[in-house]
Amino acid sequence: MQVLAAATATLAEMPFDERYGTVVAARGALIEVDGLGNAAQIGSRIRIAIRTGTIDAEVTGLENGRALCLPFGDPQGVAAGARAVVAAGEFAIRPCAAWLGRMVDGLGRPVDGKGGLPTGLVPRPIRATPPPAAGRARVGAKVETGVRALDVFAPLCEGQRLGLFAGSGVGKSVLLSMLARWTDCDVAVIGLIGERGREVQEFVEDDLGPAGLARSVVVVATSDEPALMRRQAAWTTLAIAEHFRDQGLKVLCLMDSVTRFAMAQREIGLASGEPPATKGYTPTVFAELPRLLERAGPGVPGQGTITGLFTVLVDGDDHNEPVADAVRGILDGHVVITRKIAERGRYPAIDLLKSVSRTLPRCHTPEENDIRLAARRILSTYGDMEEMVRLGAYKPGSSPEVDEAIRLAPQIEALLTQGKQDQANAAQTFAILAELLAVEPAATADARPEPTLEMAA
């Protein structure tokens, strides 16, 4: 009877049927599977047998009755005629509070050598839809980041999504590490998408540190991993953030970088036969970007928030290239980091006049807005006359406004210069700026109104 009961239990756990096909072709990373019929759907999981076991793949396209699959791992060892089985269920993860302090890959598997991961009770799909627009809460209160230039000129609020736009080698990742350590939040979910493998441990040990890691989950997909895994890691980052948001927590979601997510989606689209469009990017790239980025933000009332900081690696320092242009239109603000400022030694190399936070001016007090606008006017005037001053073409005394800008702009620049370990306080920064600029109280100051999108329209 015991043998019969065990056999019955085993049979109950087995699927009623198993659909499988065979590999008929492979071109680069693309694998064609025939014989799956209608069991192969876009997004289905496929397990392909190889000599050493199996590799997971995903159906990314269908053509002439065949499933076009891309693997999550190295396709070495895939042979013609290999068995390909449709796996049950969709890609899902089961995050829980025990994931804090751990590093996982794009499929939610541990990669930090600390053993297995406990799992939560409820599976969460890696691809999810954002909360309904009509039911979402509004952006919350201002969040202090510890970075003077951001707290004054491009402030961040709970549930806001801010982009960090920069070329390579101008301090984008360093700024992100400062924000990861200092930004006020309950949980940080950090996605390192397409990053250099050697930088992962440096980021975790030096930039985050033990205290930062204890409140964080790090999702890693390095640049040498297949495009499908890099794309999946971005989705997994948002899925983990959504889990903690649903617990009512304030979540900080950092992703470095959205550009490499777009590049991975371009590889997938081109391999599946999708026609290239602008600069080789396929149409699905520009469809997937809002689906990814809109998942960050406020939840519905009663939930927490996902405050998103997304880096964008601009191609050739062109801030109007297709991915940067598309992302800038989706997010709630953009911070521009320029090579010219970095070359003269001011870090973070944020171009204050080109950076915008769409929560201004309401997230600052009237007094803080007066100080910010006065500082912007000084920097703008100095920027207009900087070349003439350096060439000696400007005669001191010709314009009181220019003379004031020449005197004060270097002091403002010095105040905004900040080291990697130098955490700032926003209230102190505003107090120093007010003293430096001698700004009058808001009730009597003759401050020009803040330009807004409504005024421009």
Image (spheres, helix red, strand yellow):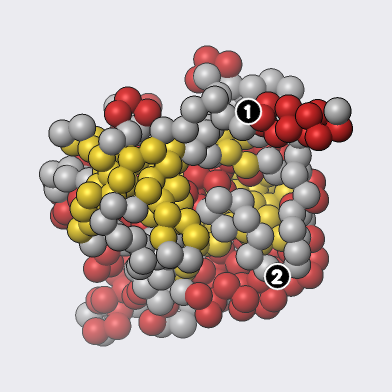
**x and y, in percent, of residue 397 in the image:** 35, 73
Comparing 344 with 317, the one in front is 317
Is any atom of residue 436 visible in this view? no
Q: Residues within 10 Å of mark 2 (few under 14, many from 20)?
A: few
Q: Residue at x 80, y 66 (%)?
A: 211
Q: Quadrant location of residue 393?
A: bottom left
Foreground disc of the pair 1, 2: 2
Q: What is the secondary structure assignment of the residue under circle 2?
A: loop
**x and y, in percent, of residue 131 in the image:** 55, 24
**x and y, in percent, of residue 100 in the image:** 76, 54
Q: Quadrant location of residue 453?
A: top left
Q: Earlier in the sequence, mark 1 or mark 2?
A: 2
Q: Residues within 10 Å of mark 1 (few under 14, many from 20)?
A: many
Residue 299, which numbered label? 1
Above or below, 76 relative to 344: above
Name the amino acid, label 2.
Gly
Comparing 46 with 151, the one in front is 46
Comparing 409 with 452, the one in front is 452
Above or below, 345 relative to 269: below
Residue 113, which numbered label? 2
Name the amino acid, label 1.
Gly
Is any atom of residue 88 visible in this view? yes
Image quarter where the C terminus lies is top left
